[in-house]
Amino acid sequence: MIVIGVDPGTIVSGYGIVEVRDSSFYCISSGFISQPRSRSLPNRLRHIYGKLAGLIEQYSPDEMSIEDVFFSKNARSTLKLGEARGVSILAAAAADIPVYEYSPTEVKSAVTGNGRATKTDVQKMISAMLNIPEFEKSDTSDALAIAICHLNSIEIKKKYGFSIRKKSRAKKRFNLNDIPS
């Protein structure tokens, strides 16, 4: 199974494409989508959509996992993050790929065993798991962590027959086929 993990942002969005085979993780591709602050928000969103749609076409992931929205004191930043998440989810939905959301705490816990782990802790663990010496941006390691979090939850469900997530938290977004004509 191949999963694309996305750490959305309007200036920098990280992505990580991870495959699981025989209970081992392999990084197929990872990086970030960066753009200047001077670019208008609609053009930044279009750029994110285009890049993710291209990655989806190139690597044909089975599913997408994305960081769930968190609330900050700055409502404007939260809204912009939601817009970046929206175009990311749309890129997957347009390719009929299911999307799963995970909170930052769930991702940290799944990767490091500690829901309050630092970004450095997450980077070190992802580096060790995928044999990647270093990351240019934390957005890349975060996206890989989001993909691994999802793959871990699938592996646990297969092996033990139950999900590590509470039913009320498990969210699957709709695909375009779910929308009546």
Image (cartoon, rainbow, N blue to C red):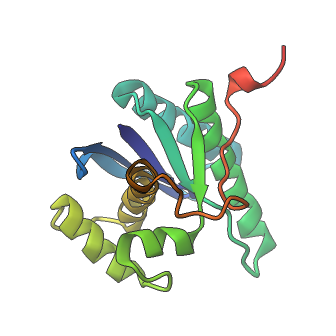
Q: Describe residue 99's horizontal placement relative to residue 61 as left or right.
A: right
Say above or below: 111 vs 95: below
Q: Residue drawn 28% across and 67% down?
A: 126
Report the front residue among 21 and 160. Answer: 160
Q: Residue drawn 15% across and 66% down?
A: 133
Q: Quadrant of residue 70?
A: bottom right
Report the front residue among 116 and 132. Answer: 116
Q: Describe residue 133's horizontal placement relative to residue 39 as left or right.
A: left
Percent position of residue 147, x then y: 42, 53
- Total numbered badges shown on the rendered structure: 0
Percent position of residue 152, x then y: 39, 57
Report the front residue among 156 and 50. Answer: 156
Say above or below: 85 vs 108: above
Q: Describe residue 66's horizontal placement relative to residue 119 as left or right.
A: right
Q: Residue drawn 76% across and 61% down?
A: 79
For this orientation, the residue located farthest to the right is 181
Percent position of residue 149, x then y: 43, 60
Percent position of residue 6, x then y: 49, 52
Q: The C terminus lies in which quarter of the figure?
A: top right
Q: The N terminus lies in which quarter of the figure?
A: top left
For this orientation, the residue located farthest to the top is 181
Q: Quadrant of residue 165?
A: bottom right
- Residue 38 is at least partly visible in this image: no
- Residue 128 is at least partly visible in this image: yes
Q: Quadrant of residue 180?
A: top right
Say above or below: 122 vs 132: below
